[in-house]
């Protein structure tokens, strides 16, 4: 892997890169990346080309975890999540063991630890709200004693189970999505025989979420600027119209996208350029995941 | 006599709700010509463009591309020959990476992986986006997306380029770059636009369409000086000709 690393624009090389398509790893300001890229026709010395930010940047880093086949990572993640969700409330040792496993995967994958924690913590407010009901509710009604009452004990165990499981399960998906470009996840799902309809759904969801968010924002801005002092209730009612408007626009856009696809010979599937290949490392990943899942299930 | 790049004969089309969009369009475009399609909003420009590769089918009349009549059996051949660039690049860039978007057409044409790589490389270089191949479209600027949309059809090496408002919403520099880029492409071009200066600098010939029919067709230099004609159809003279 290290043999084909080229210095990045931080450290110019004497010879310009060969023209054409590159899939090699290269270094930028101390970070080693690998992604499909081309060089400007008359490229100067160095390795000059655009790079993403945020999640996109992380998914193009080079690490043993990034190199794993997306199918192995997807199946591994599903197995781990199932084991986490279906097991009885976790003991401290199990929790710490899984947590250590995920953090080492993140560390090998060069993901910043704080980034992983922050992303996984997003689930805590949601899971926390649900978890809070566990000590309070009993048999379908609120328990008399409150969170410290005599009946609350079992509830606290359930609350811990909900929180710990939600946190671990989300951490699994964070590590997966941080070390795998979205296009590869979609390619992996495709090759795992997920139906074309779902594949198209996932890719369009990824591609168009921002577009719709921008449309919604401009609709809201238009509403607020024409009705700055509208009472809240009436405004909420108007949001119903807004949703309808957005639906129609989405429908129109869907039609135009379909036309654009037909223009370029669409015949039912979305071809992508990513090639997949299983290796010994993928087998090792599956082994580790199965052992961890078995440990959680059987311990 | 070589067959025309594009030939429309008495093309009529009505929308499903009964609105007449095209009421008898005759247009012949020769190989290598660049034609600007001018006209006010709702004149039928976009509807006409959608007829050029069979997305819409005429109720009456016929469309031929490079001598091949457009019908059910020739749809795939014609679509491989006509590169259609939509006005909103977000409609055209639907894959998860720019590379996959530009490779979409060639892959659907059944080309080998190496050929596809080479074509993507060539198309991305032509529009100056080579360095962004692995990026998703939502991380590109609007000007870049507009050029990327062009690359997605250039990779199919179309003989006829059909462009709907190629310069709309671009900032002046991006607009200039787009015009220079289009000017350098050897393909036959049809472009629908409100950008009179763009039309004047790219196209020797202009056709004015209004109310679903072509009301004027001739050398751009003449049409763009005809203030009465332009005014009557909601257009204006390009700033470049105003001084003279």
Image: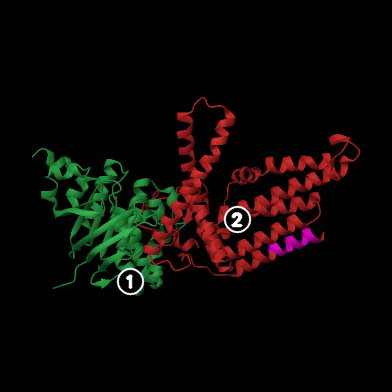
Main SS, magenta residues: helix
Q: Which residues fall within the magenta stretch?
A: A288-297
**Residue for badge 1:** B71
**Residue for badge 2:** A176
Is A34 magenta? The answer is no
Please name whichever residue, B97 or B38, is drawn nearer the observer in this view of the structure.
B38
| Residue B135 percent location from the top left of the image | 44, 53
Is A292 magenta? The answer is yes
Instruction: Mark 1: give few (<14), some (14-19) or many (20+) Cα within 10 Å.
Output: some
> Which residue appears at 68% of the width and 52% of the height?
A169
Q: Colour of chain A?
A: red
Instruction: Mark 2: give few (<14), some (14-19) or many (20+) Cα within 10 Å.
Output: many
Q: Looking at the image, can residue A264 be seen?
A: yes
Quadrant housing residue A80: bottom right
Numbered disc in front, either 1 or 2: 1
| Residue B75 percent location from the top left of the image | 35, 70
Residue B243 appears left or right of A102: left
- Specify the chain shown as green: B
Please name whichever residue, B199 or A172, is drawn nearer the observer in this view of the structure.
B199
User: Which subunit holds the residue at mark 1?
Assistant: B
């Amino acid at each position: 892997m290290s043999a084909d690393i080229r210095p990045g624009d931080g450290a110019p090389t004497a010879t310009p890169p060969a023209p054409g398509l590159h899939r090699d790893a290269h270094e930028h300001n101390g970070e080693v990346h690998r992604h499909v890229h081309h060089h400007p026709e008359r490229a100067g010395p160095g390795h000059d080309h655009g790079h993403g930010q945020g999640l996109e940047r992380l998914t193009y880093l080079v690490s043993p975890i990034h190199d794993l086949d997306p199918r192995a990572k997807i199946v591994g993640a599903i197995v781990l999540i199932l084991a986490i969700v279906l097991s009885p409330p976790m003991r401290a040792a199990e929790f710490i063991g899984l947590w250590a496993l995920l953090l080492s995967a993140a560390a090998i994958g060069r993901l910043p630890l704080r980034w992983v924690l922050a992303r996984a913590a997003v689930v805590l407010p949601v899971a926390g709200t649900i978890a809070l009901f566990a000590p309070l509710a009993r048999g379908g009604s609120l328990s008399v004693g409150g969170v410290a009452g005599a009946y609350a004990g079992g509830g606290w165990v359930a609350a811990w189970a909900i929180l710990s499981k939600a946190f671990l399960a989300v951490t699994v998906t964070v590590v997966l999505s941080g070390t795998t470009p979205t296009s590869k996840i979609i390619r992996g799902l495709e090759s795992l025989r997920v139906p074309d309809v779902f594949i198209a759904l996932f890719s369009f969801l990824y591609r168009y979420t921002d577009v719709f968010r921008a449309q919604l924002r401009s609709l809201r801005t238009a509403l607020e600027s024409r009705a700055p002092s509208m009472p809240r209730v009436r405004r909420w009612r108007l949001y119903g119209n807004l949703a309808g408007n957005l639906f129609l626009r989405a429908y129109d856009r869907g039609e135009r996208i379909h036309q654009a696809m037909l223009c370029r010979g669409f015949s039912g599937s979305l071809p992508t350029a990513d090639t997949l290949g299983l290796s010994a490392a993928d087998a090792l990943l599956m082994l580790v995941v199965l052992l961890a899942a078995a440990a959680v299930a059987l311990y | 006599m070589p067959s025309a790049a594009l030939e429309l004969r008495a093309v009529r089309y009505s929308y499903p709700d009964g609105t007449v969009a095209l009421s008898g369009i005759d247009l012949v475009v020769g190989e290598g010509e660049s034609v600007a399609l001018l006209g006010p909003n709702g004149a039928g420009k976009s509807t006409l463009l959608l007829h050029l590769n069979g997305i819409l089918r005429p109720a009456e009349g016929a469309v031929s591309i490079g001598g091949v009549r457009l019908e059910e059996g020739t749809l795939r051949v014609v679509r491989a020959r006509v590169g259609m660039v939509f006005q909103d690049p977000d409609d055209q860039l639907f894959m998860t990476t720019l590379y996959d978007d530009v490779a979409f057409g060639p892959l659907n044409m059944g080309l080998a992986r190496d050929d596809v790589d080479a074509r993507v490389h060539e198309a991305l270089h032509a529009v100056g986006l080579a360095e962004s191949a692995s990026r998703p479209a939502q991380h590109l600027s609007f000007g870049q997306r507009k050029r990327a949309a062009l690359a997605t059809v250039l990779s199919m090496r179309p003989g006829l380029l059909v462009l709907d408002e190629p310069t709309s919403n671009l900032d002046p520099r991006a607009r200039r770059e787009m015009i220079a880029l289009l000017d350098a492409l050897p393909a036959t071009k049809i472009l629908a636009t409100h950008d009179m200066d763009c039309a004047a600098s790219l196209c020797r010939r202009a056709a004015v369409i209004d109310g679903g029919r072509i009301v004027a067709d001739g050398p751009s230099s003449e049409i763009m000086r005809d203030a009465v004609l332009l005014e009557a159809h909601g257009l204006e003279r390009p700033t470049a000709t105003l001084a003279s």
